[in-house]
Image (spheres, grey):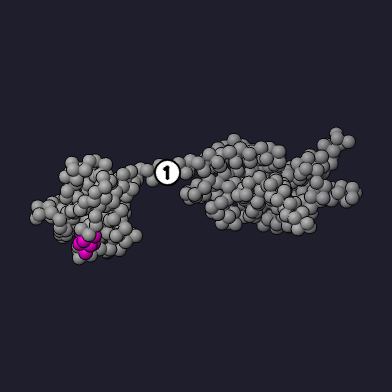
């Protein structure tokens, strides 16, 4: 179980629960906030990619990277990091790809969480 | 009985809290991290303030009793390092311990953050056990810094007052003099300066002993201090000489203050500490800048000193106020 959780799962539950003292209901609360924030930032990013607004791409990418890291969401963190990099280097193609990864990984997280509850 | 039970449980809760004034600011635009930190800090007994952008954080940072701030590096509005830098420009009465938070990890960032005035630095995701340990260090540093601030205040008081009489010393007076001269010049107002000298100080010392002389200086300083307006300044200039600064006073006002002092001193019997009292005589010299321009503090002191010399020469026990005489440099300019 430990091995699969590390490699494949969108969330490292063990790690994040350790960080918040094993409080499962608090984790649900944090995930609810994360969902809200993600949707907001994702909409911002879609707009920013369409408008080639690299500053917003970098900042929103950075924001999602931090939030994802704190909730131990490795795949989302990775995608957000690529977004931030794309913004920093004004790479529109990379930003578009990162947008796709974010969407995929977010859906995986939703499915995973949905299937558990 | 019900009532006492309630009281009891309440006091238990209070006992568990670490310290009453431990308030922490968490400034972080990522609401996940913000909630995570706030909840844990509260469970550790801290009072938590939160900000979601730089401007909000700046307002809360200025609170005097805020002890610790955890600031995210990247925030809308003001960023973490800039906040650190701005806060360190303020001289707060108590120290605020600053922890910068970032998901960056290159060492140049670390240096930039610390140079901006941060005390510590943590990378996201935050390890809460590590944060807790670092907060303990923070408490220790805050206590040290608070003590330092106290000692610094005490030292600055010691360095600026005359230890015998408790009035300002000459060094501090010269600083006030410069400030008041600049203000007088800026606002186009007059500034009065008085030099006060005890006529019979040497005789008193010879007759009653040096402890009596010290006691007299103290009584005279108190008497003058209490007769002044609260924005006037008095300092001990030398042995038995005091110097007074009277913002807003012209020649006439300065003369009035000098005459009043003479009158007050004449009426008073001064204790010598030997069971006997004695009378004191003063000579006072003064000047006021009036509407003169190109003011120079040293010339004013020199003029007052010259007036004091005239008062002594004319038979002591009197006050002489003369017109301000600009120094040579100023005179040559015209």
Q: Which of B293 and B155 is in front in this view?
A: B155
x, y (%) of residue B109? Answer: 58, 39
- Our reading of the magenta stretch's main secondary structure is helix
Q: Quadrant of the N terminus of chain B?
A: bottom right
| Circle 1 chain | B
Quadrant (top left, top right, bottom left, bottom right) of the C terminus of chain B: bottom left
Q: Which of the two residues, B77 or B23, is positioned nearer the viewer here?
A: B23
Q: Position of residue B186 (x, y in %)?
A: 30, 61
Q: Is residue B99 left or right of residue A77?
A: left
Which residue occupies 66% across, 42% down? B103
Instruction: Looking at the picture, tell me which residue is in the foreground, B111 or A59.
Output: B111
* Mark 1, residue position: B154
Location of residue B82 with respect to B250 vertically, above or below: above
Considering only vertical position in the picture, is B294 above or below A77? below
Q: Is residue B271 visible?
A: yes
Judge whether residue A39 can be spotted in this image. no
The range drawn in magenta is: B256-264
Q: Where is residue B178 in the image (x, y as percent from the top left)?
A: 29, 52
| Residue at 66% over, 45% down | B18
Is B121 left, or right, of B12 in this rendering? left
Look at the image and say whether residue B262 sits in the magenta stretch.
yes
How many marks the image carries: the answer is 1
The residue lying at 82 percent from left, 39 percent from top is A14
């Amino acid at each position: 179980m430990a091995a699969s959780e590390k490699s494949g799962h969108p969330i490292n539950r063990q790690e994040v629960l350790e960080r918040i003292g094993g409080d499962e209901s608090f984790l649900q609360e944090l995930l609810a906030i994360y969902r809200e924030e993600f949707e907001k930032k994702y909409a911002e990013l879609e707009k920013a990619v369409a408008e080639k607004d690299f500053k917003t791409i970098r900042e929103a990418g950075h924001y999602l990277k931090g939030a994802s890291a704190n909730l131990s969401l490795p795949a989302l963190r990775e995608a957000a990091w690529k977004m931030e990099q794309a913004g920093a280097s004004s790479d529109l193609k990379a930003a578009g790809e990162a947008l796709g990864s974010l969407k995929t990984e977010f859906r995986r997280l939703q499915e995973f969480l949905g299937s558990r509850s | 009985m019900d009532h006492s039970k309630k009281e009891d449980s309440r006091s238990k809760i209070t006992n568990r809290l670490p310290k009453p004034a431990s308030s922490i600011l968490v400034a972080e635009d990522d609401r996940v991290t913000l909630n995570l930190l706030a909840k844990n800090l509260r469970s550790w007994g801290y009072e938590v303030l939160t900000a979601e952008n730089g401007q909000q954080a700046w307002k809360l940072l200025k609170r005097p009793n805020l002890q610790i701030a955890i600031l995210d590096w990247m925030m809308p509005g003001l960023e973490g390092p800039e906040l650190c830098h701005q806060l360190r420009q303020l001289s707060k009465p108590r120290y605020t311990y600053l922890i910068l938070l970032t998901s960056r990890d290159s060492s140049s960032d670390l240096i930039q953050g610390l140079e901006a005035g941060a005390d510590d630095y943590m990378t996201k995701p935050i390890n809460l056990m590590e944060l807790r340990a670092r907060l303990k260090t923070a408490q220790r540093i805050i206590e040290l810094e608070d003590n330092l601030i106290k000692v610094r205040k005490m030292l600055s008081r010691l360095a600026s007052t005359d230890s015998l009489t408790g009035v300002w010393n000459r060094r501090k007076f010269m600083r006030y003099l410069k400030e008041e001269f600049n203000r007088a010049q800026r606002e186009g107002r007059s500034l009065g300066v008085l030099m006060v000298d005890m006529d019979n100080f040497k005789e008193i010392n010879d007759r009653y002993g040096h402890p009596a002389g010290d006691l007299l200086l103290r009584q005279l300083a108190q008497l003058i201090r209490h007769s002044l307006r609260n924005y006037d300044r008095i300092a001990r200039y030398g042995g038995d000489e005091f110097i007074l600064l009277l913002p807003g006073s012209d020649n006439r006002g300065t003369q009035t203050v000098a005459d009043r002092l003479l009158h007050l001193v004449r009426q008073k019997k001064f204790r010598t500490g030997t069971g006997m009292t004695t009378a004191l005589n003063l000579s006072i010299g003064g000047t006021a800048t009036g509407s003169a321009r190109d003011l120079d503090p040293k010339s004013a002191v020199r003029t007052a000193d010259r007036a004091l010399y005239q008062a002594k020469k004319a038979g002591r026990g009197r006050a002489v106020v003369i017109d301000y005489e600009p120094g040579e440099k100023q005179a040559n300019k015209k």
